[in-house]
Amino acid sequence: MSLKSIALLALLAACGGSSPAAQNPTTTTNAAAPELGPAPADDAARLEWAMNGPQRTAAEKARDAARHPKETLAFFGVNDKSHVIELAPGGGWYTEILAPYLRDD
């Protein structure tokens, strides 16, 4: 392995942060997911349903006022038929919205 490759690997390892779940071992991820029930057929209602679902904590919901998920997803043209790839989701704040919102289609 060349010196450049080793330096690049070291840099990437140093830049990789851990998610809040990794920082807090009492946080459980991939635990038994709460049952959301059937999603509404209407796109706007489905987004509201996903944002208010039991899979999101009160702290995550409280951040909606500052992060504006409806407006952000609309800006990027995301709808209930979109194919979305979430790169480096970190703590999964958007994942908790996107996964149920997009799960059926």
Image: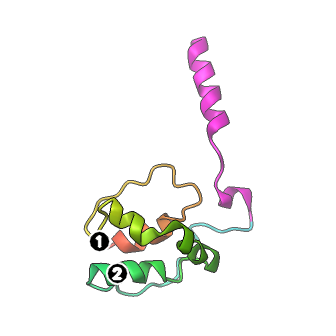
Which of the 4 image quarters holds residue 14?
A: top right
Q: Amino acid at mark 1?
A: Asp
**Label 1 neighbour load within 10 Å: few <14, some 14-19, many 20+:** some
Q: Secondary structure at mark 2?
A: helix
Q: Secondary structure at mark 1?
A: loop
Q: Earlier in the sequence, mark 1 or mark 2?
A: 2
Q: Residue 23 or 78: which is nearer the viewer?
A: 78
Q: Amino acid at mark 2?
A: Arg
74 on left or right of 27: left
Residue 20 location (% of width, % of height): 67, 59
Residue 46 bears which disc, if any? Answer: 2
Residue ID for mark 1: 80
Q: Are marks 1 and 2 in contact (CB under 8 Å)?
A: yes
Q: Which residues are magenta?
A: 2-25
Q: Residue at x 63, y 28 (%)?
A: 11
Q: How was the colour assigned to the protein in this rendering?
A: rainbow
Residue 27 location (% of width, % of height): 69, 68
